[in-house]
Image (spheres, rainbow, N blue to C red):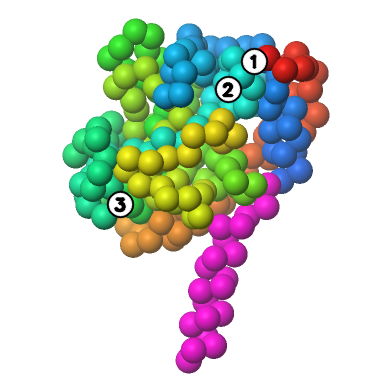
């Protein structure tokens, strides 16, 4: 019995060492210290500096990613605890937690009351209510609850676009995603990952929406994240491995 349990635990843990595909790694490397030539938003704050991060469009695939426009790199990972159990566990100290997410009504069709930051690996994308504001749907056809690929800590994880920011900051994910990305850091509701080395990529169109294929009723973050893999793997194939280099300006910003 012990060996069976140990084997099951090992297999589960291996999911979260998912390798980054060669085309996606090439995209990351090519854009890391290059300027975004197609910004589709004004600059937003990352939390470490004022107005330093833009929403950038990859013209070949139509995908949208966050890009540090001043210092090189991509985005950080602040922690969002909005939704169910917003004040519980490692979210107990979140200074800005809200009891609902932006797409609560839409996710309820899958038999849950709302997203739970402890379980659902969601990404905060889009900015409402302040100037500047930005709608990923209006600007780039990014659909609510669509899959977002996240490159963090030398691995590929999947989340969904699950919430928006009511202010002008960017680079935020659920507690579940943050702890999967950085298990060796003390990630909680008031402590995230500050380096701008996290790449969030959102994809346009209905093909990016997992719908009922996602395990919305999952009891663990691992089970939910894994349920997004089929959709996510198909999406990341659309990212060209070499095209990025011909569309960006090389060199430090």
Which residue is nearer to you in this view: 246 or 173?
Answer: 173
Gap between marks 3 and 1 measured at Cα: 35 Å
> Left of 79 or right of it: where is 61?
right
Q: Is residue 125 left or right of residue 236?
A: left
Q: Where is residue 180 in the image (x, y as percent from the top left)?
A: 48, 53
Label 1 CA crowd tier, 10 Å (few <14, some 14–19, many 20+):
many
Q: Does 142 appear in magenta?
A: no
Identify the residue at image location x=26%, y=55%: 89
In the rendered image, the quadrant that contains the C terminus is: top right
Please state which of residues 57 and 154 is positioned toward the viewer in this rendering. 154
Q: Do the residues labelled 2 and 3 touch (CB within 8 Å)?
A: no
Q: Which of marks 1 and 2 is nearer the N terminus?
A: 1
Q: What element carries label 2?
A: strand
Please say if 93 is above or below 200: below
The answer to whether residue 139 of the structure is visible from this angle is no
Counting from the top left corner in percent of width and height, residue 109 is at 27, 45
Rendered image: mark on residue 51: none
The residue beneath circle 1 is 36
Magenta segment main secondary structure: helix
**Magenta residue span:** 1-20
Q: Do the residues labelled 1 and 2 touch (CB within 8 Å)?
A: yes
Q: Which mark is residue 67?
A: 2
Label 3 vs label 1, nearer the camera: 3
User: Is 187 placed above or below 134 here?
Assistant: below
């Amino acid at each position: 019995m012990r060996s069976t349990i140990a084997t099951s635990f090992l297999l589960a843990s291996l999911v979260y060492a998912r390798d980054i595909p060669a085309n996606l790694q090439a995209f990351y490397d090519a854009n890391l210290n290059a300027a975004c030539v197609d910004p589709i938003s004004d600059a937003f704050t990352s939390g470490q500096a004022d107005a330093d991060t833009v929403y950038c469009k990859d013209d070949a695939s139509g995908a949208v990613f966050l890009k540090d426009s001043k210092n090189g790199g991509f985005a950080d990972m602040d922690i969002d605890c909005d939704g169910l159990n917003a004040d519980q566990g490692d979210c107990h100290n979140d200074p800005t937690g809200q009891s609902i997410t932006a797409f609560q009504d839409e996710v309820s069709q899958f038999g849950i009351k709302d997203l739970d930051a402890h379980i659902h690996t969601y990404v905060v994308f889009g900015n409402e209510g302040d100037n500047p504001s930005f709608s990923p749907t209006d600007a780039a056809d990014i659909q609510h609850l669509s899959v977002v690929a996240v490159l963090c800590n030398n691995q590929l994880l999947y989340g969904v676009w699950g919430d928006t920011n009511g202010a002008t900051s960017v680079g935020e994910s659920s507690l579940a995603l943050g702890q999967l990305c950085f298990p060796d850091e003390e990630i909680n509701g008031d402590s995230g990952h500050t380096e701008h080395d996290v790449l969030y990529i959102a994809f346009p169109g209905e093909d990016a929406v997992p719908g009922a294929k996602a395990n919305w009723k999952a009891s663990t973050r691992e089970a939910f994240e894994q349920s997004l893999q089929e959709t996510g793997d198909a999406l990341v194939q659309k990212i060209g491995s070499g095209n990025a280099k011909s569309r960006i300006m090389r060199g430090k910003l």
